[in-house]
């Protein structure tokens, strides 16, 4: 993989992980003034941010270098968007695999452990009554509980939920690294509580 296609970790303006850009896209954003390069390997640990002009004059340590006809350009390991970057914010998509993971492969009604094959998506407020397909309205359920609950709410069915469903926090194991090669500087930004 050419360096310009290698991944750069992207943070939003709140320094939250939002995803990865190829080096080329990351630098384009920096050149256009939409993002700043982070000196993520600096030993002083200040994580200072630089415009493109400042960045090319800096001699950052530990980065990849892009060979050009003139001076080589340092490829940032991390860029920070100037805007909150909501559009880029990575959300965990709602599907059976991720729902099962959030609910720890446990039926949220009877508490039985269920394998991925047996997991069903239960709408807490039933779909037939306008219940949306959202993290807050969906839980993993075994087939028996799902059919027993049918078109009722948990209260009507007298099947209390074991916990209130929430959108899962981002977790690094759902990140697919574009090249599979992590940079040492990324560790701190991929940690979650
Ligand atoms: Zn169950």
Image (cartoon, rainbow, N blue to C red):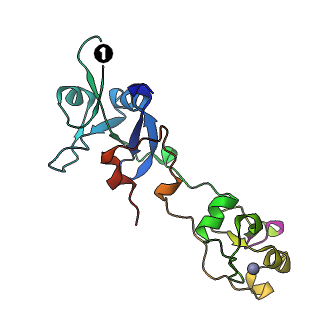
Residue behind mark 1: 68
Residue 182 rendering spot, x and y as whole percentages = 39, 44
- Residue placed at 31% from the left, 35% from the top? 76
How crowded pointer 1 is (Cα within 10 Å; few <14, some 14-19, many 20+) is rated as few
Q: Quadrant of residue 32?
A: top left
Q: Is residue 15 magenta?
A: no
Left or right: 36 as drawn, with respect to 171: left
Q: Nearer the viewer, residue 29 or 44?
A: 44
The residue lying furthest to the top in this view is 69
Q: Is residue 125 magenta?
A: yes
Q: Secondary structure at mark 1?
A: loop
Q: Quadrant of the N terminus?
A: top left
Left or right: 156 as drawn, with respect to 81: right
Q: Quadrant of residue 21?
A: top left
Q: Quadrant of the C terminus?
A: bottom left
Q: Which residues are magenta?
A: 123-128
Residue 131 rendering spot, x and y as whole percentages = 75, 67
Residue 135 can be seen in this image? no
The residue lying furthest to the left in this view is 44
């Amino acid at each position: 993989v050419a360096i310009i296609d290698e991944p750069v970790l992207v943070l939003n303006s709140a320094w939250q992980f939002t995803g990865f850009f190829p080096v080329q896209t990351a630098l384009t954003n920096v050149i256009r003034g939409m993002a700043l390069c982070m000196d993520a390997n600096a030993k002083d640990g200040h994580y200072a941010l630089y415009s493109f002009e400042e960045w090319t004059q800096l001699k950052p340590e530990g980065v990849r270098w892009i060979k050009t006809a003139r001076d080589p350009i340092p490829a940032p390991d991390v860029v920070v968007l100037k805007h909150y970057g909501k559009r880029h914010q990575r959300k965990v998509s709602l599907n059976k695999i991720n729902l099962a993971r959030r609910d720890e492969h446990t039926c949220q009604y009877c508490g039985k452990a269920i394998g991925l094959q047996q997991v069903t998506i239960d709408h807490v407020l039933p779909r037939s009554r306008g219940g949306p397909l959202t993290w807050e309205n969906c839980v993993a359920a075994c087939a028996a509980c799902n059919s027993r609950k049918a078109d009722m709410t948990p209260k009507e069915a007298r099947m209390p939920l074991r916990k209130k469903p929430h959108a899962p926090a981002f977790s690094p194991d759902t990140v697919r690294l574009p090249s599979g090669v992590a940079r040492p500087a990324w560790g701190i930004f991929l940690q979650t509580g």
